Amino acid sequence: MFSIFKKKPAPQIQPTYHVTDFSFLGGDMHSHLVPGIDDGSQTLEDSVKFVDQLYKLGIKNFITTPHIHGEMYDNDTNKVQAYFLPLKESLAISHPDIHIQASAEYFLDTYFLKEVLPKGLMPFGNNNVLVETSMAGWNRQFNEIMFAVQANSYKPILAHPERYLYETEMQVFENLKNKGVMMQLNLLSILGYYGKSIKINAEKMLALKLYDYCGTDLHHDRHLGHINAMPEQNQEILWQLSEYGFKNKDLYNNIL
């Protein structure tokens, strides 16, 4: 039997102003703009083009984060810096007001624990590092590895937790937050770009205020196309993100 007193859904809060770009973020802290080093940009020309387009969208500070993943990408600090230098030099000429630095997106596995961490990482901001785990399931040593990161005085930011579909219990992420692990939202996740389930996870995490940072995770033209269209096609979502209070601006003080 249906009740006439059935609870009505909460009314949706409507945007109170038009968000024209992504300047509210203060900058991007997750991207794959170092050319020819991973599955991101493959040429210097593409990297400059991507930066130029993001600049026009209000992003003028960049921490670009190529993969360091022992099984897939044979990268280390020296290689990242060598591949990054031509991009930095090119942008110094074409966009002298842009601030860009290279770090990495570190894959947490045994290789990282034994080979990468002991040699030192490339932190940004206040000793922050961007880390990711497997899309297939938690690494058995995940807690041990995360503890080792923190024991070495790094402050981990877990990349795109909404994409780890094997974990739907928000309490798990709340527990990580309580242990000092910060969280980063992929900008395209909330659009449904990676699928409906990931969008739902992102919405839950936003509602619980679990995110600290937001990044483009830009790899290629398809990503850029969807990001470019957001101010016109996804104004409500963009307005909600602008109201969230991401802490990206806190990461760039050391490069201004």
Image (tube, rainbow, N blue to C red):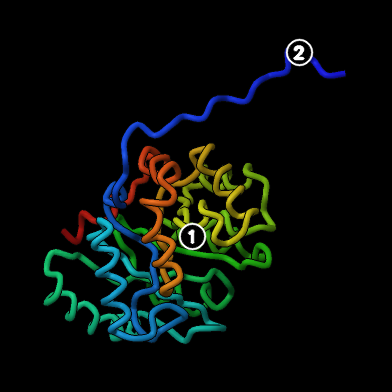
In this rendering, position of residue 223 left or right of residue 143:
left
Identity of the amino acid at label 1? Ala
Question: Badge 2 local density, few (<14 within 10 Å), some, or many (20+)?
Answer: few
Instruction: Determine whether 129 is above or below 16 in the image.
Output: below
Q: Residue at x 63, y 65 (%)?
A: 141
Q: Secondary structure at mark 1?
A: strand
Location of residue 92 in the rendering, given as x and y in whole percent from the top left corner: 14, 74
Identity of the amino acid at label 2? Ile
* Residue 159: assigned label: 1
Q: Residue at x 27, y 70 (%)?
A: 51
* Residue 46: assigned label: none
Q: Is residue 152 visible?
A: no
Location of residue 2 in the rendering, given as x and y in whole percent from the top left corner: 83, 19
Quadrant where the C terminus sits is: bottom left
Location of residue 95 in the rendering, given as x and y in whole percent from the top left corner: 15, 70
Q: Secondary structure at mark 2?
A: loop
Q: Which residue is mark 2?
A: 4
The number of callouts visible is 2
Q: Foreground: 47 or 145? A: 47
Q: Residue furthest right?
A: 1
Which picture quadrant has residue 125? Answer: bottom left
In this rendering, position of residue 34 left or right of residue 194:
left
Instruction: Determine whether 211 is above or below 226 in the image.
Output: above
Q: Foreground: 210 or 114? A: 210
Instruction: Determine whether 230 is above or below 30 in the image.
Output: above
Question: Which mark sits nearer the N-terminus, 1 or 2?
Answer: 2
Instruction: Determine whether 106 is above or below 28 in the image.
Output: below
Which picture quadrant has residue 105? Answer: bottom left
In this rendering, position of residue 81 left or right of residue 39:
left
Q: Residue at x 28, y 67 (%)?
A: 53
